[in-house]
Image (cartoon, rainbow, N blue to C red):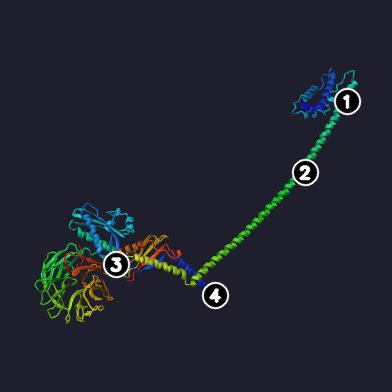
């Protein structure tokens, strides 16, 4: 509070003095003309200003301060009859004040309107510029997107083309490799793989022959086929009798020969392994 | 025209390639291989002691069956101590247990009281596949249990070898006790496994050359009981016997014709030993050989139309064959060794067993008649008197053991040898019976 008074001492003092002067005038006028405009309101306003709380003082007091109203409004006709000229002058002055004030207000309004128009124009301009900028940015962005999309599509197309070419090349290579392998097998009489297969076949046959306890009824002319399924480890999983001109003793003996031989030997080259075997028993004597 | 040629070459390669692919696809399913030989091992088989209420009888069945199969040489029955479980029916068999014991087959069964006395039920299963191969129920009696057990062995043997079992058959042989001059000769008939010997003839003079009638009901044999040789035919069931030949000189080596109506004999009535046939019903004697050499040991061909016999007409003993009709010209059959004698035909008539002099020893051999291929079966030095089992799977013969005659058996392929123990002293002249009449 003291800070406040110290800071605003001069305007406050000025304001208080002016109010006091006006009050004196009003008090004189009130003797003759009580039914006038509401000076109370002004007085109240003044009090309010003075006693306004310190946290919102400045703007109100400032707004009040330049107001010319008290001057014009608060000049009462001194006396209806006796002081007609004074009254007239006062009225004229009031009217003039009013006019001036109106003029000034009109000016202010015009000025404000102009400012507003200006501001609006400026705003519009800014808006326009902003919109233009935005539009340009948008356009640029769209452009960039479009270009990016185009680039992506092109890249994709190129990648697809590369992939397609690679695939075609790989397929061609596979074909060529198959052809080469077939040609090689053809040329070499399929030497390697056939050799491995022959060896595998021989190993299997020897193992089963060692396990076949030939019954008395197994004579030359006998021919019996077994279909055998083996697991990858050589374990015999299933033995099924096919065509067979032998008796029960032969059938049991050949079936058991395969089971007795389990697990069957593995080929030297694992690729030669066959899950399904067709074993033909045909003793030569 | 190089271009069409190149095209043809490419086309051919393409065709070849597709053909190979097709072959690969076809053979992908399976690998084909041929089995052309086997082994002659004994088949491992579990003969589980039979169950049932007939106490005492039950274990005997399994041991008789196991022993029969063992002496056939074709089977290796599991030792009793290895038989830990005792299923008595197929439903009780845990095949994985027997697979672990490496048995290929299993026989289980029961002996139970029956309306007629006892009944033996049995089943044969393949251990590897679990399949039941055989089941049966044979009525019997306490006294017949042993022969019923032989029947079980016969049926198992037949199912697993393809040949009828011969365990229900019998053997005849001569046993000699004592030393000269106080010797005793007995003609004995026993089960094929040597059990239940029964003396059918008894003499202080030599008995020899027993021969079974085709129906297995009679034996012909040579007896010196009158100080001279004579040929008798004796019915086994009744013991009734008939002297069919007691001619001057030697009466020996009787052999029955396939129909049982005639005997082939060796007689010396005309000076030297020759082959004759004797019609049993009419007593008609027919001379078959007339050679100056020794002709003896006749054996009938299966059709009854010719005889095999031993002759030394070429200087040493060889086997000949003579047809009974026509000119009766003998043709020589054996050529391989310097001595071949005592011909005996296999049951199928395709092979001839004989005694052959092989590398310094008299041994049993079998010759395939079609190929004249001779295989020597034994390794001793004084083997004699081969006789085929009626299923052709084995031969019984006489051998020498520590200076005494003994009986031995060998499988027809020579793979399996068996000494037949005997408590009857010096034994000789074995003859294997035919199959008993069925029904």
Q: Earlier in the sequence, mark 2 or mark 3?
A: 2
Q: CA distance from mark 2 to mark 1?
A: 46 Å
* Dots 4, 1 in contact, CB < 8 A: no
Identify the residue under disc 3.
A217
Dot 2 falls on a residue whose secondary structure is helix
Kindly indicate the quadrant of the structure image that contains residue A19: top right
Quadrant of the image containing the N terminus of chain B: bottom right
Are the residues under badges 3 and 4 in a single subunit? Answer: no
Q: Quadrant of residue B320?
A: bottom left
Question: Mark 3 touching mark 4, by CB under 8 A?
Answer: no
Q: Secondary structure at mark 1?
A: helix
What is the C-alpha distance between the residues marked 3 and 4? 58 Å
* Residues at circles 2 and 3 in contact by the CB criterion of under 8 Å: no
Left/right placement of residue B18 relative to residue A120 reads left
Q: Which mark is residue A92?
A: 1
Instruction: Give the CA distance from mark 4 to mark 1.
Output: 131 Å
Q: Nearer the viewer, mark 2 or mark 3?
A: 3
Image coords of residue A134 (percent x, y): 72, 47
Q: Within 10 angstroms of label 2, few (less than 14), some, or many (20 or more) residues?
A: some
- The tag on residue B257 is none
What percent of the width, then of the height, locates residue B240?
Answer: 11, 66
Q: Chain of mark 1?
A: A
Q: Residues within 10 Å of mark 3 (few under 14, many from 20)?
A: some
Q: Earlier in the sequence, mark 2 or mark 1?
A: 1
* Residue A125 circle label: 2
Q: CA distance from mark 3 to mark 1?
A: 158 Å
Label number found at residue B6: 4
């Amino acid at each position: 509070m003291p800070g406040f008074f110290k800071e605003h001492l001069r305007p406050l003092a000025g304001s208080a003095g002016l109010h006091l002067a006006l009050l004196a005038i009003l008090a004189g006028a009130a003797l003759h003309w009580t039914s006038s405009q509401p000076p109370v309101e002004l007085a109240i306003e003044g009090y309010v200003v003075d006693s306004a709380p310190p946290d919102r003082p400045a703007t109100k007091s400032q707004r009040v301060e330049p107001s010319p109203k008290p001057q014009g409004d608060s000049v009462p006709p001194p006396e209806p009859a006796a002081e007609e000229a004074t009254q007239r002058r006062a009225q004229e002055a009031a009217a003039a004040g009013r006019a001036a004030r109106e003029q000034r207000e009109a000016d202010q309004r015009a000025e404000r309107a102009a400012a507003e128009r200006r501001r609006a124009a400026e705003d519009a301009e800014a808006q326009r510029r902003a919109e233009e900028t935005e539009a340009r940015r948008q356009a640029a962005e769209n452009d960039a997107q479009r270009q990016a999309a185009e680039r992506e599509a092109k890249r994709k197309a190129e990648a697809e083309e590369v992939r397609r070419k690679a695939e075609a090349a790989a397929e061609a290579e596979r074909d060529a490799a198959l052809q080469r392998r077939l040609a090689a097998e053809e040329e070499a009489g399929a030497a390697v793989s056939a050799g491995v297969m022959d060896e595998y076949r021989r190993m299997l046959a020897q193992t089963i022959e060692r396990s076949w306890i030939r019954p008395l009824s197994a004579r030359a002319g006998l021919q019996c086929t077994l279909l055998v399924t083996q697991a990858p480890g050589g374990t015999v999983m299933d033995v099924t009798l096919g065509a067979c001109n032998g008796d029960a003793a032969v059938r049991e003996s050949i079936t058991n020969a395969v089971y007795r031989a389990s697990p069957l030997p593995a080929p030297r080259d694992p690729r030669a392994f066959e899950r399904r075997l067709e074993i033909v028993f045909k003793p030569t004597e | 025209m190089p271009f069409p040629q190149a095209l043809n070459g490419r086309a051919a390669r393409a065709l070849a390639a597709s053909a190979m692919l097709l072959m690969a696809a076809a053979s992908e399913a399976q690998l084909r291989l041929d089995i052309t030989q086997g082994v002659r091992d004994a088949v491992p088989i579990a003969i589980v002691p039979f169950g049932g209420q007939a106490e005492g009888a039950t274990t005997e069945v399994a041991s008789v069956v196991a022993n029969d199969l063992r002496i056939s040489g074709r089977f290796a029955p599991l030792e009793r101590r290895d038989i830990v479980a005792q299923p008595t029916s197929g439903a009780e068999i845990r095949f994985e247990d027997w697979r672990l014991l490496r048995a290929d087959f299993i026989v289980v069964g029961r002996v139970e009281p029956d309306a007629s006395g006892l009944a033996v039920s049995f089943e044969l299963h393949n251990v590897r596949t679990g399949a039941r191969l055989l089941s049966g129920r044979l009525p019997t009696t306490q006294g017949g249990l042993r022969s019923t057990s032989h029947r079980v062995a016969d049926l198992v043997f037949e199912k697993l070898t393809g040949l009828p079992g011969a365990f229900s058959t019998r053997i005849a042989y001569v046993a000699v006790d004592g030393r000269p001059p106080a010797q005793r000769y007995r003609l004995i008939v026993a089960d094929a496994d040597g059990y239940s010997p029964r003396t059918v003839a008894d003499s202080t003079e030599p008995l020899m050359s027993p021969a079974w009638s085709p129906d297995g009901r009679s034996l012909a044999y040579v007896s010196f009981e009158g100080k001279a040789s004579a040929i008798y035919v004796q019915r086994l069931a009744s013991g009734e016997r008939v002297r069919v030949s007691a001619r001057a000189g030697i009466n020996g080596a009787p052999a029955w014709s396939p129909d049982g109506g005639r005997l082939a004999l060796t007689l010396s009535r005309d000076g030297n030993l020759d082959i004759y046939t004797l019609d049993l019903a009419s007593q008609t004697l027919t001379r078959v050989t007339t050679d100056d050499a020794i002709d003896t040991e006749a054996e009938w061909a299966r059709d009854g139309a010719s005889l095999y016999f031993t002759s030394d007409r070429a200087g040493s003993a060889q086997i000949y064959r003579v047809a009974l009709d026509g000119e009766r010209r003998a043709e020589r059959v054996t050529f391989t060794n310097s001595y071949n004698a005592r011909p005996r035909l296999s049951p199928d008539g395709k092979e001839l067993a004989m005694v052959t002099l092989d590398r310094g020893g008299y041994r049993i051999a079998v010759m395939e008649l079609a190929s004249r291929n001779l295989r020597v079966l034994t390794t001793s030095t004084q083997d004699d008197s081969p006789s085929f089992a009626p299923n052709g799977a084995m031969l019984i013969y006489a051998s020498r053991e520590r200076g005494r005659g003994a009986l031995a058996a060998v499988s027809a392929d020579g793979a399996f040898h068996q000494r037949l123990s005997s408590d009857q002293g010096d034994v000789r002249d074995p003859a294997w019976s035919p199959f008993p009449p069925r029904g």
